């Protein structure tokens, strides 16, 4: 009761403070309905909307409401929707678009900069937008007109670091990570002050000597621990009650040369739980100890509560690039489920925490080695639907051939070559109580990996492997609606309701499509 | 040493081939000779580096007692020696590096070598051209006899292929990793389909689309055809079906043996 009162007064305070067009921070704490205020729609990463206007009975009549031409290529941006405005990020640019009409409000472009690049999206804090760029800068824009307020360098592009991640806003912290795999460089997360651009804390994916277990997971006869890896290139999730930030880290460096870095190589290829006020690590779960196949663990750590084997649990689920599906207790990082969702021949077993134990003979070899499991899925977001208890993921079964091209301890960068042969892509619905696949959608075709949205309208929105946008029955995977958009879905769909009308938005190459029911 | 130079040349030539293939302006003679000059400078730089720098930075510039130069921020930000030059000639007393009183042209050669090394390391990526020159000896770690036995026995390869027919001289056609990847799964071979209309009329051709909603083929008549999927009967023939099946069965030893055998087909 007291808690409720505090929450209520907090809500009142915020309502007073926020002007009509600003993002109300309280929106980040609720499932997305009239607002899609962050990369994943809300902090849980479920990409589940409680909207039901578009549902399995009527989705067959879904039609185009409007389309916005960004005239840009390679777009991977998840639009935000706040107070009737869509904010869409590009490599060195951004757009504000009327979420009702598809008409452009403003366009921001950095003068003299290339305009392509796979930016994943904006973050928004009150009246400000945040964007990471191909030259590894963080930009702060004014949301009302796209004017740039400041920029800071977050990593060194000369070492092939680049930006792209959609930052995550937690209260007054902008949490931002970085990308890059060509040259060795260490990954990190930083918390940035949204008003000044000052760094508040930095968490390094590479351990310090006093962090004994992690430090000892690297050899120290070379300086390989300083080169690390552990890129933080996809947006994490957040539990406000536990005050824990969950983020996935990328592969170690050198990427495919395991002999150069014997050991588990913490904190690469791990889900880490951090205190967002201090950047201190609370727990970690390493999904690919001593990875040698580029199996980043950046796929969304999806948060949900419920009972597991009769016991109430706060859970975290992730479908990993390495072909394994994990459900963890998110209070402590212990695995409740570790189960392959595609064949994964690189695993010889699991340790007592549920972390896989890799097979040494499936590390890349000078004469090549056949490896299954990756790329089981990729960064494009999955979805968890609390009503069906199903975790939806676009999966891929493929045979990888991995060659080590730089043997020895002085290997750097990628240090290998890999080919993926005979890929078969399909959408899988995984039961989070068992880790077993409940159904597989008949979406075979050219292949591709696309993001997913699920809704209380008993629907799953994604694209199929032939490039059609599709809506499926959330319980059976039956296709109920489809449309070929003339291009490729660069990220996943999102949804919002405005003036009593529900829109489903699909970014396809340089076009943003908004679908709605006719007559609304 | 010689091998590295060859690799560098291979990179340069493949980059130029790529540029030509992409329909870019044919590289001007000046561009080609500039690249050759750059490669020559890098080779002179290699000798200088070995003589003056390798004791601390290693022959390949990956560091030892001194820092790794491949992933040095200073080196990577260098433009024409503007950052490297002063460090070489002035030394770094605070870090125990003595000055090396080299001429400007020698510094330029050193810079060319270090930049070439960076390019070499950066090209070891999934997409870079470099590892395509993996020599056949490195991949041929099986035995010809075991490969032949697999080819004629459990692999079932002779059902479709003959080493004196379609596969004669196959090892001459592809570079070693391409040969291996292609025998594992020769992507690009088109799937074909026979589409039967309600009238009984049949169309045959290369399958372009079969997404559950529509089927489309490039017909033997040279024309494109499409139909609603529900209106027709479709029989699909995937010429790679046997490869896809085998791909799941190979052990690493099978792969090495088969390669060792196939690479003899010259």
Image (cartoon, coloured by chain):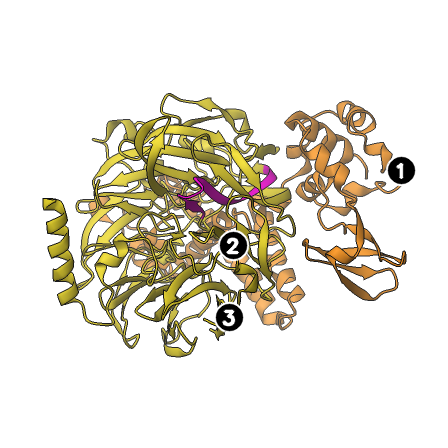
Chain colours: A yellow, B orange
Q: Chain of mark 1?
A: B
What separation in Å lies between label 3 and label 2 (alpha carbons)?
A: 15 Å
The residue drawn where x is 52% and y is 31% is A363
Q: How many marks?
A: 3
Q: Does the magenta-highlighted stretch encompass residue A390?
A: yes
Q: Residue at x 64, y 28 (%)?
A: B252
* Label number found at residue A56: 2
Chain letter belonging to callout 3: A
Identify the main secondary structure in magenta: strand
Tell me whether the residue at label 2 lies in contact with that at label 1, contact meaning CB atoms closer than 8 angstroms: no
Give the chain of mark 2.
Answer: A
Residue A100 appears at what percent x and percent y?
A: 40, 74
Circle 1 Cα neighbour tier, 10 Å, few/some/many (<14 / 14–19 / ≥20): few
Tell me the magenta residue range.
A382-401
Residue B186 shown left or right of residue B134 in the figure:
right
Mark 1 and mark 3: span between their CA atoms?
Answer: 65 Å
Q: Could you confirm whether marks 2 and 1 are on the same chain?
A: no
Q: Residue at x 34, y 57 (%)?
A: A32
Question: Which element type, helix, strand or loop, lies under badge 1?
Answer: loop
> Which quadrant, please, contains the C terminus of chain A?
bottom left
Q: Which mark is residue A518?
A: 3
Name the residue nearer the viewer: A257 or A41.
Answer: A41
Image quarter for residue B34? bottom right
Residue beneath label 1, please? B164
**x, y (%) of residue A336?**
38, 28
Asked if residue A286 shows in the view, the reply is no
The answer to whether any part of residue B83 appears in the image is: yes
Q: Quadrant of the N terminus of chain A?
A: top left
Tag 2 secondary structure = loop
């Amino acid at each position: 009761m007291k808690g409720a009162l505090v929450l209520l007064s907090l809500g009142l305070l915020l309502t007073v403070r926020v002007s009509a067009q600003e993002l109300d921070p309280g929106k980040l704490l609720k499932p997305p309905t009239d607002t899609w205020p962050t990369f994943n729609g809300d902090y849980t990463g479920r990409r589940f909307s409680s909207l039901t206007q578009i549902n399995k009975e009527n989705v067959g009549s879904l039609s185009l409401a409007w389309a916005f031409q960004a005239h840009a290529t390679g777009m991977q941006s998840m639009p935000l929707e706040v107070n009737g405005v869509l904010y869409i990020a590009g490599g060195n640019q951004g757009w504000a678009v009327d979420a009702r009409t598809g008409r452009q409000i403003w366009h921001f472009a950095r003068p003299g900069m290339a305009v392509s690049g796979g930016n994943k999206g904006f973050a928004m804090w009150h009246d400000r937008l945040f964007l990471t760029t191909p030259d590894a800068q963080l930009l702060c824009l004014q949301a009302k007109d796209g004017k740039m307020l400041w920029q800071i360098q977050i990593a060194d592009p000369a070492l092939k670091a680049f930006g792209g991640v959609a930052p995550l806003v937690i209260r007054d912290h902008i949490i931002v990570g970085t990308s890059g795999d060509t040259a060795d460089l260490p990954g990190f997360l930083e918390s940035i002050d949204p008003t000044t651009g000052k760094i508040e804390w930095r968490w390094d994916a590479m351990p310090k000597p006093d962090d004994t277990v992690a430090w000892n997971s690297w050899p120290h006869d070379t300086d390989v621990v300083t080169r690390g890896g552990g890129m933080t290139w996809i947006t994490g999730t957040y539990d406000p009650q536990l005050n824990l930030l969950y983020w996935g880290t990328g592969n170690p460096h050198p990427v495919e040369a395991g002999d150069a870095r014997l050991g588990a190589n913490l904190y690469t290829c791990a889900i880490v739980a951090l205190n967002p006020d201090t950047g201190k690590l609370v727990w970690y779960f390493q999904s690919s100890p001593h990875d040698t196949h580029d199996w980043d663990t950046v796929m969304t750590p999806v948060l949900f509560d419920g009972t597991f084997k009769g016991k109430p649990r706060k859970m975290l689920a992730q479908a990993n690039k390495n072909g394994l599906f994990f459900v963890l207790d998110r209070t402590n990082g212990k695995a409740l489920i570790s189960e392959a969702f595609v064949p994964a021949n690189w695993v010889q077993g699991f340790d007592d925490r549920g972390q896989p134990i890799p097979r040494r003979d499936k590390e890349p070899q000078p004469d090549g080695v056949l490896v299954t499991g990756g790329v089981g899925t990729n960064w494009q977001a999955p979805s968890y639907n609390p009503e069906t208890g199903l975790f939806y993921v676009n999966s891929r079964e493929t045979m990888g051939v991995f060659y080590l091209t730089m043997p020895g301890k002085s290997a750097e960068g990628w240090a290998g070559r890999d080919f993926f042969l005979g890929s078969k892509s399909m959408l899988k619905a995984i039961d989070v109580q068992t880790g077993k696949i409940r159904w597989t959608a008949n979406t075979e075709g050219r292949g591709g990996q696309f993001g997913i949205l699920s809704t209380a309208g008993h629907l799953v929105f994604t694209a199929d492997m032939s490039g059609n946008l599709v809506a499926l029955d959330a319980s059976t995977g039956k296709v109920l609606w489809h449309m070929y958009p003339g291009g490729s879905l660069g990220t996943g769909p999102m949804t919002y309701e405005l003036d009593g009308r529900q829109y489903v938005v699909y970014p396809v190459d340089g076009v943003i499509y908004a679908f709605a029911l006719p007559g609304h | 040493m010689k091998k590295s130079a060859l690799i560098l040349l291979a990179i340069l030539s493949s980059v130029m081939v790529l540029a030509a293939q992409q329909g870019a302006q044919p590289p001007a003679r000046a561009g080609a000779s500039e690249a050759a000059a750059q490669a020559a400078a890098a080779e002179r730089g290699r000798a200088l580096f070995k003589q003056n720098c390798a004791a601390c930075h290693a022959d390949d510039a990956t560091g030892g007692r001194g820092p790794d130069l491949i992933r040095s921020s200073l080196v990577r930000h260098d433009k024409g020696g503007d950052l490297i030059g002063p460090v070489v000639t002035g030394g770094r007393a605070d870090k125990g590096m003595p000055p090396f009183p080299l001429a400007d042209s020698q510094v330029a050669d050193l810079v060319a070598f270090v930049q070439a090394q960076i390019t070499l390391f950066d090209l070891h990526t999934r997409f870079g051209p470099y590892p395509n020159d993996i020599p056949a000896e490195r991949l041929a770690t099986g035995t010809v006899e075991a490969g032949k036995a697999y080819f004629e026995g459990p692999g079932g390869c002779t059902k479709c292929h003959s080493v004196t027919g379609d596969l004669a001289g196959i090892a001459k056609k592809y570079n070693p990793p391409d040969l291996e990847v292609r025998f594992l799964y020769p992507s690009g071979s088109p799937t074909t389909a026979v589409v039967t209309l309600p009238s009984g009329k049949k169309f045959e051709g290369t399958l372009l689309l079969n997404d559950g909603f529509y089927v489309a083929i490039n017909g033997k008549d040279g024309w494109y055809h499409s139909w609603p999927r529900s209106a027709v009967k479709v029989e699909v023939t995937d010429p790679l079906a046997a490869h896809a099946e085998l791909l799941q069965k190979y052990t690493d030893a099978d792969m090495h043996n088969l390669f060792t055998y196939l690479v003899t087909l010259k």
